[in-house]
Image (cartoon, rainbow, N blue to C red):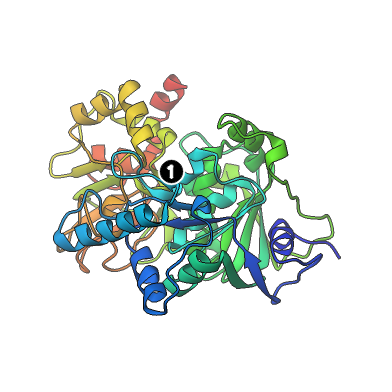
Amino acid sequence: MGMTIAEKILAAHSGHDYVVPGQLIECRTDWVLCHEITTPAALRMLEERGMDQVFNPDQIVAVPDHSVPAMNIKAAKMYQKLKSWVQEKGIKHFFDVGRGGIAHVVLENTGLMKPGQTLVSGDSHTCNAGALGAFATGVGSTDLAGAIYAGKVWFKVPETMLIRVTGQAQPGVTPKDIVLEVIKRIGADGANYMVMEWVGDYIDNLDMEGRFTLTNMAIEAGGKTGIVAVDDTTRAYMSARGVTPDQYTEYQSDADATFKVIVEVDAAQVEPTVAYPHIPSNGRVAGSDRIAVSHAYVGSCTNGRISDLRDVARILKGRKVAEGVQMIVVPATQAIWKQAAQEGLLEIFVDAGASVSYPSCGACLGMHSGVLGPDDVCISSSNRNFVGRMGDPSAQIYLASPATVAASAVAGFISDPRAYNDTINAAD
């Protein structure tokens, strides 16, 4: 019986020729990703037990991103803890404030994380890196402490859900709409502790930025991680970062691999999708209801990349954000911010009446840069719309693609971005 991509990676990192779902393994981790929110708790655990050491300072990546620049004294102390640890332990890969951005997007662009490798972090959206054909997953601070100390983590080998996406999406329909459609179908726990493996000709023709959006939201379906097999698109992406095929291992699922569930999606039938409060699986077609918005938010590790900002700029160019709507655009990294500036996107945003913020997690988790107040209604390109996620518990959060967020910001109510398809096609 064959193995899936994830099973092959876990077998190779646990000293086994073969693993099966449900098997407990001690897995070697190639990389540990740290930020200022969950890492300090892990470090305290190690310090309290006299285990204050690092398995390999060259295999740890540290990126302060959740509440930077610090918005209060507590945030400043957490940042100081991470930075002092980095300096004390000689952590090689540190992307400080002004040099980084959102940790997952920073890491995906460095060339450090490679196909066939393993990654853990004290952050649930670590599954983002699975688009590289790697096994990447979030863990709690206790497991993070163990990974920092020993470079190993215990896993139960997960089952795999195969998601086959075929056909060509309509203009105005993006990977964010595809993943929201899948989560709507299977439910917020439909992939509980599974690997979500994405295949099909739609995936074959999708760029890396779109693939990262798909794998990023595996956790919103309860998944352990998302993954996409290595192909020419992946190889070109790695090559652009100075990484050659001899520096990594490619894995493909065997023809006789066992999948727990198979989900079939015709991309041509997917419409711009909005996840209504208060769960990502509560998806409906954009514009189904005329819902007024007070906030429009573009950013996060899901949709703060340059292609996302271009989608927003195509709709905002020559238009204005509606009166009464506060729009915030947060490029995911410093490099993306700079590229957006060079392409003139930031000027388009400002001319339209949007605010451009410093690269960080921002208001996605209700900590910084645009936190929602009582009864605010926000349409957001982020990944979660739980009660209180972006601020006050009474606020309403609607998840959508950056294009849908932009269209809604202009209209003043949740709108279908396909109304601007002529603009999108002209830009293309």
Relative placement, left or right, of 175 versus 231 is: left
Say how many tags the image has. 1
- Residue that label 1 marks: 106
Q: Taking 58 as reference, is 411 above or below it?
A: above
Q: Taking 53 as reference, is 413 above or below it?
A: above
Identify the residue at horizontal 37%, vertical 47% (top origin).
102
Identify the residue at horizontal 60%, vertical 35% (top origin).
238
Give the image quarter of residue 315.
top left
Q: Residue furthest bottom?
A: 49
Relative placement, left or right, of 160 versus 309 is: right
Give the SS element for disc 1.
Answer: helix
Q: Is residue 174 visible?
A: no
Identify the residue at horizontal 74%, vertical 50% (top origin).
251
Relative placement, left or right, of 391 versus 115 is: left
Q: Amino acid at mark 1?
A: Val
Identify the residue at horizontal 46%, vertical 66% (top origin).
53
Q: x%, y% of residue 205? A: 63, 35
Picture quarter with the N terminus: bottom right
